Image (cartoon, coloured by chain):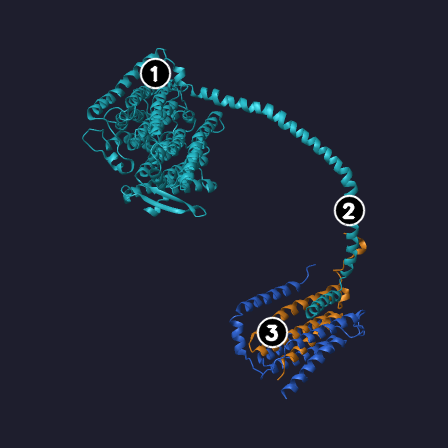
Chain colours: A orange, B cyan, C blue
Amino acid sequence: MIPLNHSLAIAALLFVLGLAVVLLRRELLFILMGLEVMFNGVALTAIAAGQHWGNADGQVLTIMLMAVTAAEIVVALILIWLAFDRYKAVRVEALTRLRDDNKEGVP
Amino acid sequence: MSQWLWLIPGAPLLGALVIALLGGLLRREYFAMAANCAAAAAFAAVLLAWFTGAASQPLQQTLYTWIAVGDWRLAIGFTLDRLALVMVSIVSGVGLLIHLYSAASMAEETDQRRYYFFLNLFLAGMLILVLADNLLLLYLGWELVGLCSYALIGFWYREPLPSNAGRKAFIVTRVGDTALALGIFLLFSQFHELSLSALLTHATTQWEPGSQLATLVAMLILGGAVGKSAQLPLQVWLPDAMAGPSPVSALIHAATMVTAGVYLIARTHPLFELAPSVQWLVAAIGALTIVYGASSALAQTDFKRVLAYSTISQIGYMFLALGCGAYALALFHLTTHAFFKALLFLSAGAVIRTGGDEHDMHNLGRLGNHPPLARWTFLAGAASLAGLPFVTAGFYSKDAILATAWTAPAGPLLWMFAAVGALLTAVYIFRAYLLVFHGPGPRTSTISLPPLMAWPLLILALLSLVSGFVELPEGWPGPHLWSTWLEDELGLAAFPSLTITYTLQAIAVLLPLAGIGLAMLLIHREQTGQSLPAADFLRTGWGFDAFYHAALVRPYHALARGLWRTVDTLVIEGALTRITTGFLAFAAFCRKSVEHRVLEVGIASLVMALQIGYSRLSATQNGFLSRYALMISAGATFLLGYWLW
Amino acid sequence: MHEIIFYLTSAIAVIAAGAILIVRHPVHAAIYLIVSLLALALLFFLLGAPLLAALQVMLYAGAIMVLFLFLIMMMNLRTGQNRPLSLPAGWVPAALLALFLWLELLLLLTRSPSEKVGDVTTIGPKAVGNALFGPYLLVVEAVAVLLLAALVAVLYLSRRRQK
């Protein structure tokens, strides 16, 4: 059958692809989608491992993961909407309010 | 009943707490009601104890563990044996009557909340003292009553006289309290035990009679008892304590608190039996104090001071009985004394109150117009105090003590003192009675007392007349209920042979009658302008106050002033000036060298380094989400790589 | 046969995920994401977790993606607003980093012993439910609180601004 390693390799690949999306794309929506892909890579890991050891814990973990993702995604989406609504920002370059402005010298 | 024992001291304590904590919610007329309810609850609990068999079987209740150190435990526990039962009955019964009397007599005072708080707290403290089954709890009650006594003597604290009297009482009794504390420490260091019953058993089995330790412990306990019970030489606080309200004088300084010393000695009497010399000292102190108090009372002009010196003298009788080993008789006199002295104070208080707060007996006699009820009840109390034969309680209790004193070592001498005291007692109390109630003022009056004042007076008058019949004199047919009931705990008193006893009794019968005659003569002399020989000496209480002032207070002041002059100004201030100068020089040196050269350069370079580091680091805070994510991933990758490698 | 379907499906999932990296329009990215998620659901099924496969379809492909699409429509982003795909400056380190991480993960997998396994054991909804409401009941409650918190947060953030 399918060895555990193969499932895990595919999961790792999904995770890394999602990470690449987060790192390389600058649109907020794309970053969020990248995060989703990463989550799914983790979910695949959990299920593959759970099936391998023959118990339901992996599936339970995935259900929890889905719930957390759902909570995360609604908040993230509303924040993206607020960023668009207030700052007309669709790309992360426009949201640099955390920048530490050291031109003005030591605070 | 055992599990309700806590209610006896608990009810007044609860009342005090309610008055103190929730007093803001109560109208001021309710304070008296709350305090009376608490006192009544305590008295009801005592009655319940009587009816549920406490009279035959000691009750015991342990509330909770107070202190636990290592494997040593000290519990808050109460024991109600017969000795304690007598005491709680007197304390709660007389306490209740005086609470009721207060409700009427103190009704116009402004500071009701403070008054009733301390009155209830006093009752709780006294009951804790009496019920305590270990010495530490007893000491707690002991100090609690001392505190309340101080607060109530100084109740009118805005005037200098009461507040000074309160302070004096507190400081003088402190001398005795310290002795008692030292005695408790000594007992604990010997036996590692504070429980009274265990201590007394240990002491009687481990100490030789007359051994040094037993003598020392008995001396220290006697010191505590002398301070609290106002015996020579610590009696000076009691006459001044009369500056407080009359109900307070009646409750604390006549009926209950001053008898705490008697109770303490009766409770620890096995210790005194191990130290016969100290026990004889108790008797001697008692005998001396009888004469001292009675003679001082002869020359007083202040109505309440007569009663105060009388209290000192009467407690001397109790000490005499204790010293002769007649503990039950001491307790008997304590009981009758509580009744008639409370009665005397309360009726005197009523007279003083209707006389417009006049304390001088000659002025009171000129004023006249005293309430008849106060007059008759005062007469009953005076008769009982003087020990008029056959019809008064005071006769039976005092006569027994006189008879038993004969058997002690140097008995006839002690008896002489006590007999002289008995004669003088009749003289001074009837002098006071004749001065106040048979003065030149109008005698008939229709002033009636409010019922809350009248009823306690009537009840106390009845008790001070009839309560003596429970114990008829030795050698008489009739009941000896008191001594047989207390025999198991306190033993029987020794009496001389029957012929001597009858002779002594005959003299004791004649003494009060002779005293009344003498009092009439004395009044006659006073009205013709002649005064007693050495009246001033007697009026100032044999000059004890002046002596203490000269011997203790003034040297103390001189010492303090001397120390202030020499040590303070010369030594301490001089040293301080040196130290300050040296420190200033050191500080100047530090400022020049260290601060300018080292610190400034160091701080400047530190600041520069921080600035450089800051500008480098803040470049990373560029606000780009992607950069942050990249850094997180780089960190994770590095960590994983390190781990794999 | 089973293996062929598995590897084919995983290829689809990976390719769809990779496509997100390079498409320009958000709607296209969302469709690729759906494809990837559906492929993943099939993988779950093949691994013997039918309940999770169903949930994946319903929750991710059904609910979450609808939210994405709603937002894309509300923002009304046209292709013209997006700049033509140009990878941002400094993409090389990021790409290298991702690649390096994948290689590390693969290394990690090859190091762990690869056991021979038997047939697929299907763990059905009943077993999952027993585990979920048995030993993990407290976690379920915690997740419920978390969802409530998210709900409150969204309501708070989406309130109308008071001028």
Q: Nearer the viewer, mark 1 or mark 3?
A: 3
Same-chain status of marks 1 and 2: yes
Q: Are marks 1 and 3 in contact (CB under 8 Å)?
A: no
Find residue B367 and report its image quarter: top left
The secondary structure type at the circle numbered 2 is helix
Query: Which residue bears the numbered disc 2?
Result: B602
At label 3, which amino acid type do we have?
Thr
Classify the position of the C terminus of chain C by image quarter. Answer: bottom right
Q: Are marks 1 and 2 in contact (CB under 8 Å)?
A: no
Earlier-in-chain disc, 1 versus 2: 1
Q: Residues within 10 Å of mark 2 (few under 14, many from 20)?
A: few
Residue B528's spot in the image, x, y percent?
Answer: 35, 10
Residue B321's spot in the image, x, y percent?
Answer: 30, 29
Q: Chain of mark 3?
A: A
Q: CA distance from mark 1 to mark 2?
A: 98 Å
Please report the residue visible at 35 percent of the width from the left and 47 percent of the height from the top: B3
Query: Which residue bears the numbered disc 3?
Result: A62
Query: Which residue bears the numbered disc 1?
Result: B440
Q: Nearer the viewer, mark 3 or mark 2?
A: 2
In the rendered image, the residue lying farthest to the bottom is C1
